[in-house]
Amino acid sequence: MLLHEFRPGRLLLGLTALALAAVYAGDAAGAWTTPWYVVVPVLCGGLGTAALATWVAYRIRRRSARSRSSESTGAPASSSGSQDIR
């Protein structure tokens, strides 16, 4: 049983943050040199990808919820004549 619903946008944003942390940790350890401006395109790309994934997941959840709902097109039970209306 799932405890909560899957949020792909949050997953992608977390992976982006971990990637940036790894890049700058490698720079701090002296493994390689990373310019300061690398954070801007990586973070913007991660935010854009996360937003797109969130939008797609929202549309899928909304479409599946709409198909699962079984709205009745008939008259409601209270006006069908089986009960008195006062």
Image: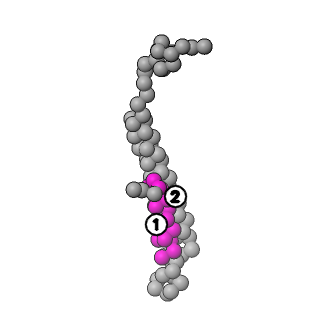
Quadrant of residue 63 in the image?
Answer: top left
Q: Earlier in the sequence, mark 1 or mark 2?
A: 1
Q: Is residue 5 above or below residue 68?
A: below
Question: What residue sits right under mark 2 in the picture?
Answer: 47
- Any part of residue 63 in sight: no
Write the residue at 45% across / 40% down: 62
Looking at the image, residue 72 sits to the left or right of residue 44; the answer is left
- The amino acid at mark 2 is Leu
In this rendering, would 24 be left or right of 86? left
Q: Is residue 2 visible?
A: yes
Residue with the mark numbered 1? 15
Q: Identify residue type, mark 1.
A: Leu
**Residue at (43, 19) in percent of width and height:** 74
Mark 1, Cα crowd under 10 Å, few <14 / some 14-19 / many 20+, is some
**How would you rate the neighbour count of disc 2 (Cα within 10 Å): few for under 14, some for 14-19, many for 20 or more?**
some
Closest to the observer, 43 or 33: 43
Q: What's the magenta bit mostly, secondary-structure-wise?
A: helix
Q: Position of residue 2 (x, y in %)?
A: 42, 56
Q: Residue at x 43, y 21 (%)?
A: 73
Image quarter for residue 86?
A: top right
Give coordinates of residue 54: x percent, y percent: 47, 51
